[in-house]
């Protein structure tokens, strides 16, 4: 990579990792079982889908939030607000209504609830009478959020948020201005 740039420059980089996570979850959906199972156990696909889709959504929340609330976003997010509050904050800045009763926003909240169960695992101790044992967190993920569903939610959220905010998507951009190398960086023989 360094061969593509001058020896010394003043760089300006913008990178939206949410865009990468959107690509990751799409690849996760599209990977053949054979190729996926070379690296991961088959039952990891759906939990990984929940986590990666949640990363994409959270990344887009920050991408848009920082642009619609230039002065307070960083301070607001230091409070570790739940995803719903962050979305409500963005829509308040946009002066647009947002509802969590149904649709994409409801699914986002449900996806994040499942994500929280996965990334903050708790010991499970349960008793149940019937034909099968109590469901584990992985059973619940498989039932509620197959990887294609998680991907669909992340893509729909990205589209809705970008459309509502009228912010153009960005993945990665690097600009630079070549400069003379300072003396302190010059090699001595």
Image (spheres, grey):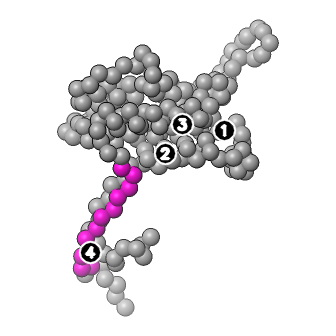
Relative image position of residue 140 (x, y in whole percent): 64, 23
The single residue placed furthest to the top in the displayed view is 129
N-terminal of the two: label 2 or label 1?
Answer: 2
Q: Between residues 45 and 117, which one lies in front from this camera angle?
A: 45
- Residue linked to disc 4: 178
Q: Is residue 129 above or below residue 118?
A: above
Is 172 contained in the magenta span?
yes
**Picture disc at residue 44:** 1
N-terminal of the two: label 2 or label 3?
Answer: 2
* Spatial separation of the CA atoms under disc 2 and disc 3: 10 Å
N-terminal of the two: label 1 or label 3?
Answer: 1
* Spatial separation of the CA atoms under disc 1 and disc 3: 15 Å
**Quadrant of the frame with the C terminus:** bottom left
N-terminal of the two: label 4 or label 2?
Answer: 2
Q: Is residue 76 above or below residue 124?
A: below
> What is the magenta range?
170-182
Q: Between residues 94 and 183, which one lies in front from this camera angle?
A: 94
**Picture disc at residue 187:** none
- Residue linked to disc 2: 21
Q: Is residue 187 above or below residue 88?
A: below
| In contact (CB < 8 Å): disc 2 and disc 3 | no
- Residue linked to disc 3: 151
């Amino acid at each position: 990579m360094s061969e593509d740039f001058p020896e010394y420059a003043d760089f300006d980089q913008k990178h939206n990792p949410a865009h990468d996570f959107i690509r990751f979850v799409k690849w996760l959906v599209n990977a053949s079982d054979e190729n996926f199972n070379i690296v991961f156990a088959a039952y990891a696909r759906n939990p990984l889908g929940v986590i990666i889709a949640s990363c994409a959504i959270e990344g887009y929340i920050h991408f848009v939030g920082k642009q619609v609330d230039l002065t307070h976003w960083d301070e607001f997010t230091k409070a570790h607000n739940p995803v719903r509050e962050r979305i409500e904050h963005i829509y308040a800045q946009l002066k647009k209504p947002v509802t969590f009763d149904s649709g994409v926003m409801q699914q986002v909240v449900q996806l994040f609830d499942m994500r929280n169960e996965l990334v903050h695992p708790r010991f499970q101790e349960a008793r149940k009478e019937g034909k099968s044992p109590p469901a584990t967190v992985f059973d619940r993920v498989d039932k509620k959020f197959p990887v294609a569903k998680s991907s669909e939610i992340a893509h729909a959220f990205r589209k809705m948020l970008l459309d509502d905010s009228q912010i153009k998507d960005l993945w990665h951009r690097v600009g630079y201005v070549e400069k003379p190398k300072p003396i302190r960086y010059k090699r001595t023989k």
